[in-house]
Image (cartoon, rainbow, N blue to C red):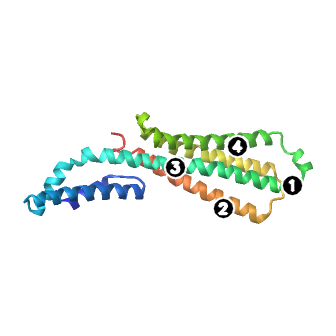
Amino acid sequence: MRIDDYVAELDRALAGPHGPKHDLVVEARDSLTDTAEALEAEGLDRAEAERVAVAEFGELAEVAPDYQAELTAAAGRRLGFLLFISVPLTALMWSVIWRIYPGNEAVWRHAPVWYRPVSRLLDVLQLCVGLYGGLALFALSRGARWIHRPRLVTRSLGVLVWAMLPVTWALSVALTLGAKGASQLDVLPSLLANVVTSAFWGLQIYGATRCLRVSRSRLARR
């Protein structure tokens, strides 16, 4: 098999973030090319040198799982970092907005009895999600030497996002309806906050979907 064919098959076999995947494929190509050039300098023709280089590099079935494991961890690190940053930032942003536009205090005193417990619950859930994202990020980077199955960490992040976003959305809607009439939010700050929150949610869903997909890959399970 020639180098171009081998690299093309490796690229098709792998799944993961575009940047890290591209780097791994380029790294494999460069390694194969260097070996082929060295063999060519020893007297082999180019085609034979490439075939020998590919043979020495290893069968695709042996090489690809290690590459896929790195891509799976990379997907988890990206989502972990996103959760660690975006979830607490979202909570802080809305907390600041509610404090700047507190509304009528008399109306707040007549808010539903469940309002404050639900508000605290939402804060705690967001804090836990952010912390778990940070722990997963550490586990898939500096703590990788102690993690025997990083694929499960990546997969757990995807499951967490898909499980928590509907809960977060439902609690947020309940709080918005429960605070009706108590808030005097300006249109622009509220609109901007909703746009930022929606953007974060979209990125989280995208990252979670990718984590679930790459962790379910046949190569990732090896």
Picture disc at residue 182: none
Name the one closer to the observer, 88 or 161: 88
Query: Which one is earlier in the sequence, the residue at label 4 or at label 1?
Result: 1
13 w.r.t. 134: above or below: below
Picture disc at residue 79: 3
User: For mark 4, what is the residue?
Assistant: 123
User: For mark 1, what is the residue?
Assistant: 103
For the residues labelled 3 and 4, the Cα–Cα distance comes to 20 Å
Residue drawn 58% across and 47% down?
84
Q: Which amino acid, by three-letter code, is at mark 3? A: Leu
Quarter-of-image position of residue 65: top left
Picture disc at residue 195: 2
Quarter-of-image position of residue 7: bottom left
Query: Which one is earlier in the sequence, the residue at label 2 or at label 1?
Result: 1
Query: Which one is earlier in the sequence, the residue at label 3 or at label 4?
Result: 3
Marks 2 and 4: CB-CB under 8 Å? no
- Is 196 situated left or right of 177 in this image? left
Q: Which amino acid, by three-letter code, is at mark 1? A: Gly
